[in-house]
Image (spheres, rainbow, N blue to C red):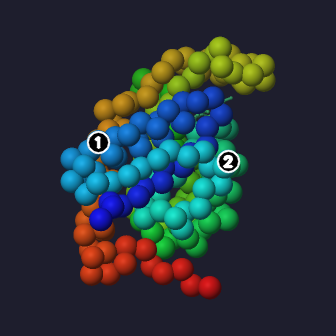
Amino acid sequence: MSGPRVLVTYASRHGATRELAEALARDLVASDAGREVGLYAAAVAAESRPDPSSWDAVVLGSAVYAGRWLPAARDLATQRAGALRRRPVWLFSSGPIGDPPYPTDEAQDAPAIAALVAPRGHRVFPGRLDKALLGFAERAVVTAMRAPLGDFRDWDAVRAWAGEIAGAVAVSSAAAAAEPLVTPDVS
Ligand SMILES: Cc1cc2nc3c(=O)[nH]c(=O)nc-3n(C[C@H](O)[C@H](O)[C@H](O)COP(=O)(O)O)c2cc1C
């Protein structure tokens, strides 16, 4: 029998969040719980509008710009809220930069997205700010704000979180032997 399937879907402007999502997918599969249950995971851009209904669990994340999630991740949460609510969902934001990470506020739209999809958790991961990747306007903002440049992503924290999620998905999938993991879609 095949193991649970976990979709890691993300919105990224300059690649840092895409790489976090790819690491999450790899770490979910490689985790102890993931290997035990034969978990399958894939990182898919939210822009390509993946269908959450084809997956047992979903991790949805976005880079944060000017205090908000990117439209592709917001739209996926809004348009597929019903399907997301019926399966285990986790959210992550990739934003704060510097050491200690700044800003400390979570994305303005995170509470509304959480209210829509009822996630089991929301993690904020430090991101990356590489001036060479930014457009002209972004570079001006970053310079004006004297934002710290660099790659602040914490791969150990990503791996640890993937292990937690894989453990929870494994528990849900064991329970699904008696009861479906996903609440049936109603037409
Ligand atoms: C113009 C600009 C505005 C930003 N605004 C925020 C913000 O409001 N809050 C935040 O946490 N991070 C902010 N960031 C940091 C990015 O979210 C961070 O660098 C992220 O890792 C980028 O992800 P991406 O490469 O996937 O687009 C901003 C970055 C830029 C360049």
Residue 96 vs residue 157, the one in the foreground: 157
User: Looking at this rendering, what residue extends furthest in the front direction?
Assistant: 1
Determine whether the residue tagged by mark 1 lies in a helix, strand or loop: helix
The quadrant of the picture showing ligand 1 is: top right
Q: Nearer the viewer, mark 2 or mark 1?
A: 1
- Counting from the top left corner in percent of width and height, residue 10 is at 56, 45
- Number of marks: 2
Question: Residue at 68% across / 57% down in the picture?
Answer: 75
Residue 46 vs residue 114, the one in the foreground: 46
Which residue type does callout 2 highlight?
Answer: Glu
Locate residue 149: give its quadrant. Answer: top right
Question: Residue at 54% across / 68% down in the picture?
Answer: 53
Could you tell me which quadrant the N terminus lies in?
Answer: bottom left
Could you tell me which quadrant the C terminus lies in?
Answer: bottom right
Residue ID for mark 1: 30
Cα distance between the residues tagged 2 and 1: 26 Å
The answer, for residue 59, to whether it is visible in the render is yes
Residue 45 vs residue 90, the one in the foreground: 45
The answer, for residue 61, to whether it is visible in the render is no
Classify 10 Å Cα crowding around label 1: few (below 14), some (14-19), many (20 and above): many
User: Looking at this rendering, what residue extends furthest in the right direction?
Assistant: 137
Tell me: residue 23, above or below residue 68. Answer: above
Which residue type does callout 1 highlight?
Answer: Ala
- Counting from the top left corner in percent of width and height, residue 43 is at 50, 44
Question: Residue at 36% across / 31% down in the picture?
Answer: 155
Locate residue 136: give its quadrant. Answer: top right
Determine whether the residue tagged by mark 2 lies in a helix, strand or loop: helix
Question: Residue at 75% across / 22% down in the picture?
Answer: 135
Left or right, 95 with respect to 80, comes to left
Residue 176 vs residue 153, the one in the foreground: 176
- Counting from the top left corner in percent of width and height, residue 163 is at 28, 47
Residue 47 bears which disc, if any?
2
